[in-house]
Image (tube, rainbow, N blue to C red):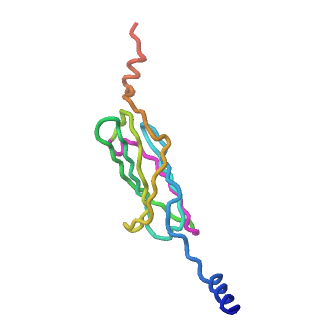
């Protein structure tokens, strides 16, 4: 019995450790009416050509929701951890935000078109209030006075 326990202990302690599966640990959105930033962290990434795809849904009080989908590459460190950040303007997606929106979305870690892990994004703020703002030319016009 002691020999069996000793062998079991030896097998457990000398068996090769398996790396953690590739996964996202954090995914955060921060932004406003003109631009946004998405930051991710993760671990266990050994796959080549990894990307983080994100989708953001902006739901107005009335009307159709707006969907934004894009991706950016991430490169793992030797220990498999990774982090990535991207900053984008809404104009890149041909949107000018002019209403009140509730935000939601998620990120997907993928390699060679194979999804590895999905995580719901945390949003700060969770809502955007982008009611019509004066354009730069209107601001100039409003600041000018005729004497």
x, y percent for residue 83: 53, 58
Q: Residue furthest left?
A: 63
Q: Residue furthest right?
A: 2
**Which image quadrant for residue 71?**
bottom left
Looking at the picture, how far across and down is residue 3, in whole percent?
69, 93
Question: What quarter of the picture does the C terminus occupy?
Answer: top left
Q: In the shown orientation, is residue 74 left or right of residue 113?
A: right
Residue 136 percent location from the top left of the image: 39, 27
**Residue 109 part of the magenta segment:** no
Q: In this picture, which residue range is highlighted in magenta?
A: 78-94
Q: Using the rendered view, name the quadrant where residue 53 is placed.
A: bottom left
69 or 85, which is in the foreground? Answer: 69
Residue sitting nearer the eye, 5 or 112 = 5
Vertical comparison of 96 with 3: above or below: above
What's the residue at 37%, 42% (across, down)? 58
Position above or below: 77 against 58: below
* Camera-nearest residue between 106 and 95: 106
Please tell me in which quadrant of the rendered image residue 110 appears.
bottom left
Q: Is residue 35 above or below residue 135?
A: below
Quick one: quadrant of the N terminus? bottom right
Residue visible at 53% across and 68% down? 44
Relative image position of residue 112 (x, y in whole percent): 39, 68
Q: Residue 89 lies in magenta, yes or no? A: yes
Count of numbered badges drawn on the protein: 0
Quick one: which residue is furthest to the front in this view?
1
Q: Residue shown at 45%/38% (left/top)?
A: 32
């Amino acid at each position: 019995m002691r020999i069996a326990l000793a062998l079991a202990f030896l097998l457990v302690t000398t068996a090769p450790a398996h790396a953690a599966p590739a996964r996202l640990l954090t995914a955060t959105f921060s932004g406003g009416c003109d631009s946004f930033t998405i930051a991710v962290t993760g671990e266990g990434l050994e796959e080549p050509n990894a990307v983080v795809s994100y989708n953001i849904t902006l739901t107005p009080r009335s009307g159709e929701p707006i969907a934004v989908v894009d991706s950016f590459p991430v490169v793992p460190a030797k220990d498999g951890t990774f982090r990535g950040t991207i900053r984008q303007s809404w104009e890149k997606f041909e949107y000018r935000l002019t209403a009140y929106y509730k935000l939601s979305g998620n990120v997907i870690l993928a390699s060679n078109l194979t999804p590895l892990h999905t995580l719901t994004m945390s949003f700060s703020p969770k809502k955007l209030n982008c009611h019509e703002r004066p354009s730069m030319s209107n601001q100039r016009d409003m600041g000018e006075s005729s004497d």
